[in-house]
Amino acid sequence: GTVTLAPTVNAAFGTTAGSATWIFNNLTLRNATTSASSITITTEGGGTGPINVGNLLRLGSASDTGSTTLNATTREWNINGTNGDPFQIFGASALTASTSLFSYNGDNGSGTTTVQQATYARLKINNPAEIFSLEGNTTSTTSTIEDGTLDIMANSFTTLDDLSFTLANATLQGTGNVTVGGDVLGVGGFIIN
C-alpha cells in the first residue's frame, strides 16, 4: 500500500523518541493546498530510528499546485526500491538534507537504479549486484560507495568532504566530472573516462 502525508501547512513526521524503525512500501509526502504556496515537512529530531521505503518515495506530486520541501534532519532514509526509480521529486519540491543519510540499497533486476538529483548530506550506495545512475548533477557532503557501482554518466558529482569506497566491489564510473573536497579512501575502483 501507500501512505500519503498531505498537509496544507508545515508538518512534522517521524518518531519523537526512541529508535523504532518506520517501514513503508510506498511513501508520498506532498502539499495538499490548492494555491502555489510551499510547505515544509520536517522529520522529527527526537527519535533516531531509520525510515525504510521498500518501493517508492515521492516528494510532491505531478498534480500539486504548491511545492513540498522535505527537511530530512538527522535521520537515515533507506531507499530500497527495485523499480528503477525509487525516489522521485516532482516540480518545485525539494530536499533539505540537513545531516541525514540517504542510502540506496535496491536492485532493479531489469536495469539500473536512478539516484534522484538532489543535494545530500550523506549519500550511500549499497548493493553489490546493482549499477546506480545519477539522474543529474549531484552534490553530497560525504559520499560512501559501500558496495556496487555508482555511474555518474555525463553528470557532475561533487563530494564536499570525503569520498569512501568500503568494499572491493565498490566502483565509481562515468564520463562526467568528479570533485572531492576531502579524502578519497578505500579499496574499490575509480573509472572516469
Image: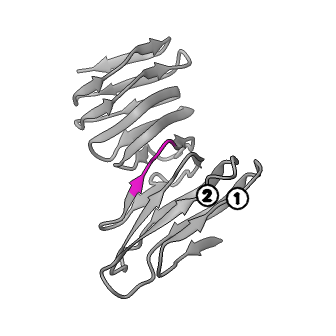
Q: Position of residue 128 (x, y in %)?
A: 56, 29
Residue 51 in view in this figure: yes
Q: Secondary structure at mark 1?
A: loop
Position of residue 81 measured from the top left corner of the image (x, y, whole percent)? 56, 52
Amino acid type, mark 1: Thr
Q: Position of residue 15 (x, y in %)?
A: 70, 58
Task: Please give the name of the residue rendered at 50% of the width and 41% of the height, measured from the top-left corner.
Answer: 99
Task: Say what secondary structure mark 2 lies in.
Answer: loop
> Where does label 1 land, which residue?
16
Residue at label 2?
Answer: 44
Q: Which of the image's four quarters has the N terminus?
A: bottom right
Q: Is residue 130 visible?
A: no
Q: Are marks 2 and 1 in contact (CB under 8 Å)?
A: yes
* Side of 75 where 142 appears, left or right: left
Is the residue marked by circle 1 packed among few (<14), some (14-19), or many (20+) residues within 10 Å?
some
Which of marks 1 and 2 precedes in the sequence?
A: 1
Residue at the spot x=49%, y=28% of the render? 144
Q: How is the image coloured?
A: one colour
Q: Determine the residue located farthest toward the front in the rendered image.
A: 46
Please say if 80 is above or below 160: below
Q: Is residue 13 magenta?
A: no
Residue lying at 30% horizontally and 68% vertically, measured from the top left? 91
User: Residue at (56%, 18%) from the top-left corner?
Assistant: 167
* Disc assigned to residue 120: none
Of residues 128 and 74, which is closer to you in this image? Answer: 74
> Which amino acid lies under the numbered mark 2 shown in the image of this protein?
Glu
Image quadrant for the C terminus? top left
Q: Is residue 153 left or right of residue 54?
A: left
Residue 167 vs 152, above or below: the answer is above
In three-dimensional space, the C-alpha distance between marks 2 and 1, rounded to whole angstroms, equals: 6 Å
Q: Which residues are magenta?
A: 95-99
Number of labelled discs?
Answer: 2
